[in-house]
């Protein structure tokens, strides 16, 4: 019997021990997808027969091979976000305007998952081009939050978050170019770590290095182990660090250093956005837990750019990047992305180069604070609770409506620092999870995970389940 809420590491161990077959695992998750996905809309593409065939091949390998010869996640299903290519499957980018032809080749990130033994389970929903923090698209419909189907699960890795928290997958691929791993982690009560720029590479550098791949999971163990199979030197990448000498799984087993300096940021980086009291409560509980663990809360400001300067720079780079998504029918692009593409046309080469230069200036200034002033920064993941489905229509602009969701996350896409959202608070009034974001200096995923383990012990979350009936 397969427990759909088992971790990916637990499932992989059970497969190696021949306690469960990859076929049983695949059938468990495919059955749950058939039952639950009509209600929550996590998947935009399924190939169940192909999944079962791959599971059968994985089961045959278990019989033939010694356990130590199997890859670490042999036979574990993993859905892939519909912004990257899986050979033989379409990539729609969440849009009606794109080509539906099967892709001739998987992206490097997908091949890395496959090398680790993961079996592609299907493709998960995303907002069109991954441009906003919720999926309510003409192409893929509305993705709903299992904690409250009238609310969004966040995005743009919407389906990934829904699939994992609802037990339709043990872990899911996700991408983050402005918060798209951390925002759904906060909305659905999961762990979401955005790696350092260059740690996890793909086919090309996306959005000037703002965007990167990772996973959404229920546990720190899965997050560390999954990132370990993704973080290896990539000689074909524009930039890539050497393969780490110590695994993140090993780092997670080490106790966090004592007496860390903890900075705090709870004021919105965009003028006019008020932070929800539940998000502030979550930060307060986190800081108390860190103080009780022997760490020092320091009152030192982050050297932030002006609100309008940061937003303008970020949007110039983002609009040009989104304009580069390949489309075959421009008339079917959703209105907000048509507006983004038009805005991109007004960004001349000098302005774009200056914007990229400014992101480097911001990055150095802020990264230096993690040497001079503090070791970790704590913020709310979002400035709001998960918004109501359709709530963006009041503003008429989904990009603007998403600002409170990404106001604390997008800065660290610009700086390239590692940042993790942890489900450390559950709001009793709304019944919704609330994430807290921890940010570290570049390449310090190990420290993030170690401190996250400390917080997990103080404020545990893994037994929380949404009401799915």
Image (cartoon, rainbow, N blue to C red):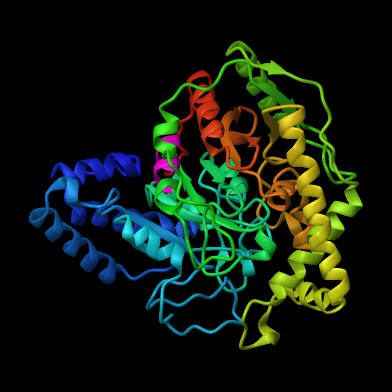
Magenta region, main secondary structure: helix
Q: Residue at x 49, y 83 (%)?
A: 100
Estimate the x, y position of residue 50 in percent, counting from the top left: 27, 71
In this view, the residue in front, 286 or 313, is: 313
Magenta segment:
219-226
Q: Is residue 222 magenta?
A: yes
70, above or below 397, in the image = above
Q: Residue at x 54, y 23 (%)?
A: 455
In this rendering, does residue 299 appear at all? yes
In this view, the residue in front, 251 or 23, is: 251
In this rendering, does residue 219 appear at all? no
- Quadrant (top left, top right, bottom left, bottom right) of the C terminus: top left
Number of callouts: 0
- Farthest residue toward the left? 64
Estimate the x, y position of residue 209 in percent, counting from the top left: 65, 59
| Picture quadrant where residue 79 is located | bottom left
Q: Residue at x 91, y 52 (%)?
A: 308
Estimate the x, y position of residue 10 in percent, counting from the top left: 29, 39
Estimate the x, y position of residue 282 in percent, counting from the top left: 66, 27
In this view, the residue in front, 406 or 135, is: 406
| Picture quadrant where residue 382 is located | top right
268, above or below 320, in the image = above
408, above or below 104, in the image = above
Q: Is residue 342 magenta?
A: no
- Quadrant (top left, top right, bottom left, bottom right) of the N terminus: top left
């Amino acid at each position: 019997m397969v427990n759909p809420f088992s971790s990916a590491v637990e499932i992989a161990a059970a497969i190696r021990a021949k306690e469960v077959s990859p076929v049983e695992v695949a059938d468990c998750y495919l059955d749950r997808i058939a039952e639950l996905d009509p209600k929550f809309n996590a998947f935009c593409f399924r190939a169940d027969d192909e999944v079962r065939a791959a599971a059968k091949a994985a089961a045959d390998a278990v019989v033939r091979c010694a356990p130590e010869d199997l890859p670490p996640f042999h036979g574990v299903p993993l859905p892939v976000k519909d912004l990257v290519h899986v050979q033989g499957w379409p990539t729609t980018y969440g849009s009606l305007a794109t080509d539906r032809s099967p892709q001739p080749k998987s992206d490097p990130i997908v091949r890395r998952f496959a090398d680790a033994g993961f079996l592609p389970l299907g493709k998960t929903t995303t907002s069109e081009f991954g441009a906003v923090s919720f999926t309510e698209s003409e192409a893929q419909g509305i993705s709903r939050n299992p904690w409250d189907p009238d609310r969004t699960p966040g995005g743009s890795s919407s389906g990934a978050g829904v699939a994992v928290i609802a037990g339709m997958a043990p872990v899911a691929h996700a991408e983050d170019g402005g918060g798209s791993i951390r925002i759904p982690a906060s909305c659905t009560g999961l762990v979401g770590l955005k790696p350092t720029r260059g740690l996890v590479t793909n086919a090309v550098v996306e959005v000037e290095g703002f965007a990167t791949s990772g996973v959404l999971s229920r546990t720190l163990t899965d997050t560390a182990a999954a990132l370990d199979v993704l973080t290896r030197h990539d000689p074909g990448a524009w930039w890539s660090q050497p393969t780490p000498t110590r695994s993140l799984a090993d780092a997670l087993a080490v106790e966090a250093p004592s007496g860390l300096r903890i900075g705090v940021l709870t004021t919105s980086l965009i003028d006019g956005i008020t932070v929800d009291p539940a998000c502030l409560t979550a930060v307060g509980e986190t800081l108390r837990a860190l103080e009780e663990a022997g760490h020092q809360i320091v009152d030192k400001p982050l050297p932030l750019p002006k609100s309008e300067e940061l937003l303008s720079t970020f949007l110039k780079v983002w609009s040009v990047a989104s304009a580069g998504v390949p489309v075959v029918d421009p008339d079917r692009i959703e209105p907000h992305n048509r507006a983004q593409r038009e805005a991109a046309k007004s960004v001349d080469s000098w302005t774009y180069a200056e914007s990229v230069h400014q992101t480097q200036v911001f990055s150095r200034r802020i990264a230096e604070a993690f040497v001079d002033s503090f070791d970790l920064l704590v913020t709310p993941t979002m400035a709001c609770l998960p918004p109501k489905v359709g709530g963006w229509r009041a503003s008429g602009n989904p990009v603007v409506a998403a600002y409170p969701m990404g106001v604390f996350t997008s800065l660290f896409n610009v700086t390239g620092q590692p940042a993790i959202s942890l489900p450390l608070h559950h709001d009793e009034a709304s019944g919704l999870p609330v994430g807290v974001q921890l940010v570290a200096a570049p390449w310090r995923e190990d420290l993030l995970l170690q401190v996250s383990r400390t917080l997990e012990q103080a404020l545990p979350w893994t037994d929380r389940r949404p009401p799915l009936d």
